[in-house]
Amino acid sequence: IEELGLTQDQVTELEQLRNQCQAQTETIREQLKTLHEGMAELWDVDAPDATAIKTLAAKIDAVQAQMRNNCIDHRIAALEVLTTEQRTQLRELIRNRPGHGGGMGMGPGPGCGMGPGCGGPGGMGGSMMGGPGRGDGTGPRSQKGTCPLTNK
């Protein structure tokens, strides 16, 4: 975001953090995709097995928690790149962004970084740490060129 007046070093460091987050969460995203496909299969029968569905749901919850924790760590690291003034400006920009009650957060797609989208399905909605997520890994941060800090 131009308003933050990032230095080239900050942009570079944020890009490196985003790339690290994407690499770290790739396996988790694949796991979640496989687990969700398995869940669809469990439901796609005449008599769904409640025990099997609940067991798989617990596995999905655990993997989603792992994704969420990775994204929290990433967001904290990204915030540490910013100066105190830049963090204050970022919070203001997020609060004043039309139609976005969230902010930095885990949301749709493999995009990692400031703004919705730290690489995973679902998400931590609301508050400073999350914009709404989508369970399918698609959305505004799933494509390159959508990181609001680096425009990549």
Image (cartoon, helix red, strand yellow):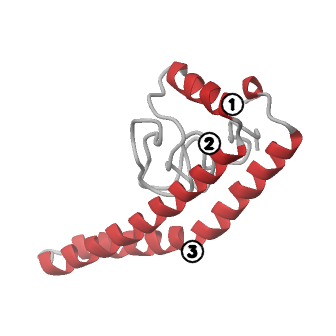
Say which of 73 and 113 sits in front: 73
- Picture quadrant of residue 52: bottom left
Between circles 2 and 1, the one closer to the viewer is: 1
Residue at the spot 19% in from the left edge and 73% down from the top edge = 54
Lateral position of residue 16 relative to residue 130, left or right: right
Residue 103 horizontal/vertical position (percent): 52, 35
Which residue, given by chain and number where applicable, does mark 1 sit on?
A: 86
- Disc 2 from disc 3: Cα separation: 21 Å
Label 2 neighbour load within 10 Å: few <14, some 14-19, many 20+: many
Q: Amino acid at mark 2?
A: Met
Query: Element type at marker 3?
Result: helix
- Amino acid type of disc 3? Thr
Residue beneath label 2, please?
A: 114
Q: Quadrant of the N terminus?
A: top right
Q: Quadrant of residue 150?
A: top right
Which residue occupies the foreground of this view, 35 or 123? 123
- C-alpha gap between disc 2 and disc 1: 12 Å
User: Disc 1 residue type?
Assistant: Gln
First in sequence: mark 3 vs mark 1:
3
CA–CA distance in space, label 3 to label 1:
32 Å
